[in-house]
Image (cartoon, rainbow, N blue to C red):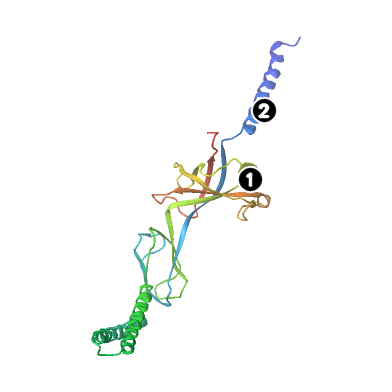
Amino acid sequence: MISKKKILIPIVIILIAACVILFLFLKNNTPKNIVTGSGTIEATEIDISSRLSGEILEITKNEGDAVFKGELLVTIRADELLARRTGFEAQHIEAQRNFLRAKSLFEVGGISKMDFDRAETQYLSAKAQLESVDASLKDARLFSPISGVILLKNFEVGEIAFPGAAIVTLADLSRVMIHIYIDEPYIGLVSLGDEAHIAVDSFPERDFIGAVTYISDEPEFTPKNVQTKEERTKLVFAIKIELENPDGALKPGMPADAEIIIKGKK
């Protein structure tokens, strides 16, 4: 006769297995209150370039250095402009003297209107030339338009800068962003303004809080930097999350993981 104990053991095993299967099923099919994605930290970048061609005399900062708004960053040699300014300044002084003399004479009828107009035209022309060279000289000293950090130094002292070339690149780290890509079934769950939690390997204990500021209207293929070919063939939607970074802890290029909290399911 089979004992009750031998009968109960298989039953207990079957019940335990059933519970495990049910737990896994519920876990995988219960609606989640988050949408996840990964990307890299990005920051607004500003190229500092000159309108002049000339030798770089000074670059005051190195890569990684903090800068303040209005701080001098680059000085470019402008000897030719300085020489031209000396000549234009002399012409301006002489033209101004002649114009004032002509004005006094014209007011008492000492010269004709034509002579007065000629003196005025010469004065205004000399003034415009001086102002023009002064404006160009301002381009020889480049100041930071923001407070941030030097991301790239593209030239060295002694090299020749040319118009439009970025001498240094600044990053505004006070507010950073991350782009993630999510599959089409989840795009309807995300809304602008949704809270997002950002985690980076460099600060495993910190939870950085941001918000969704952009949701793409059209799908695209997963970016090519994704590792597997299968993942790259998926159609996904781009989402941008922005977050404050007052202490500058988050740096451009840091890998980051994001969890978007879905409204109404918190």
How far from the left and from the top, in percent, is residue 34? 56, 38
Amino acid type assigned to the residue bearing label 1 in the image: Asp
Secondary structure of the residue carrying numbered label 2: helix
Q: CA distance from mark 2 to mark 1?
A: 27 Å
Whether residue 235 appears in this view of the structure is: yes
Q: Which residue is mark 1?
A: 183
Q: Which residue is mark 2?
A: 21
How far from the left and from the top, in percent, is residue 6? 71, 15
How far from the left and from the top, in percent, is residue 266? 52, 33
Give the quarter of the image for residue 10.
top right
Residue at far front of view: 109
Amino acid type assigned to the residue bearing label 2 in the image: Ile
User: Looking at this view, is 150 or 181 the one in front?
Assistant: 181
Whether residue 78 appears in this view of the structure is: no
Determine the residue positioned at 38% across, 76% down. Answer: 136
Q: Is residue 129 above or below residue 201?
A: below
How far from the left and from the top, in percent, is residue 264? 54, 34
User: Looking at this view, is 98 or 170 the one in front?
Assistant: 98
Crowd tier of the residue under label 2, counting other residues whose Cα lies within 10 Å: few below 14, some 14–19, many 20 or above: few
Q: Earlier in the sequence, mark 2 or mark 1?
A: 2
